[in-house]
Image (cartoon, grey):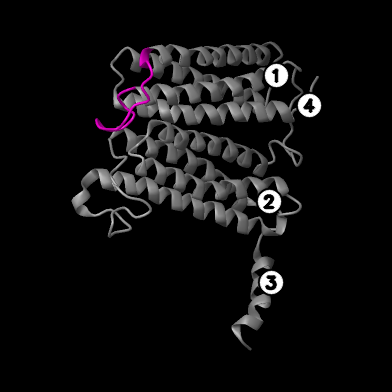
Amino acid sequence: MSTASRLPQITGRLAARLPRTVDARVRRLAVASLVGQTLLVVTGGAVRLTASGLGCPTWPRCTDTSLVNTPEMGIHGFIEFGNRLLTFALAAVAALMLVYLWNLRKERRDLFLLALGLLASIPAQAVIGGVTVLTGLNPWVVGLHFLVSMALVVFATLLVNRAFGRTGRFRTAALHPLPGALRPVTSAVAVFSALAVMLGVVVTGAGPHAGDADAPRNGLDWDLFSHIHAVPAYLVTAGTLVALALVLMRRIPGPFRTAVFALLAVTVLQAVIGFTQYYNGIPALLVAAHMLGAALLMGAATNAWDLAKSSPVK
């Protein structure tokens, strides 16, 4: 029997081995997606903060003659190629997630579409990364690259919540009823978090860490936009404190309580890092921490909003 004629039999056997319920394998891959997307923000920050954006001066190859970095390129080539390599690892995780969800693609369309979106984003990110290199680190393209990563953190957070049955139509976790005000409050926190991140990209594009010394800046007033960037950050803090007050006054237990405390911790951490870097000459290490904090903030704000949306209202 030829290989072609045996193909349906082989694929049928493979499909039989794939999960028919959301099991530990699917959940582990969802967590890996979230961790990987967050790590990609960190490695992308390392590329920018070490002036390694042109460590691989061409795209899609690293050099005109090599797909990978060469020893002659030094640490900058290693950092830039490492960031590119992580993108391929995330593509593998997303593809494997789709394979494991194949038998569930109709029943758990929510998970399948989120995983498909994460996989589809990989070539999009690769193209944006290529345009970044080919435009000599244009700050607006660099900023778009970062914002897409933030969106992927949001999608990966939703994927984790739904894979673990915490939220969504297939929720299995018991969620305590919440005051009706918490839905608009957490929605506002999520929106202002996204706005703070977008304005943070503008601030970075105007400042010393937009790339190496020869990389273009966006030409905007860094100090002015730093203060504008702080406005939605203050609103995030205010909304988080309102949510915390309601949780404590109504003695709300369970996942939402934990989500609000996590959101508060990330918000306070981001505020401390932001003020410290502003008044200490914007050291690169603190900028890197602030970029990681932005990813954590988007994840925490998405988690709180998703839980509030899925919880019954009292």
Report the front residue among 15 and 115.
115
Q: CA distance from mark 2 to mark 1?
A: 31 Å
Residue range of the region highlighted in magenta in the rendering = 207-223
Q: Disc 3 or disc 1, which is closer to the eye?
A: 1
Label 4: element kind? loop
What is the C-alpha distance between the residues marked 3 and 4?
41 Å
Measure the C-alpha gap from mark 3 to mark 1. 47 Å
Q: In the image, what residue occupies the spot 70% across and 45% down?
A: 110
Please identify the quarter of the rendering in which residue 249 is found: top right
Callout 2 secondary element: loop
Asked whether residue 215 is drawn in magenta, I would say: yes
Q: Are marks 4 and 1 in contact (CB under 8 Å)?
A: no
| Foreground: disc 2 or disc 1 | 1
Residue corresponding to mark 3: 12
Residue sitting at x 61%, y 86%: 2
Q: Tell me the residue that label 2 is attached to.
A: 22
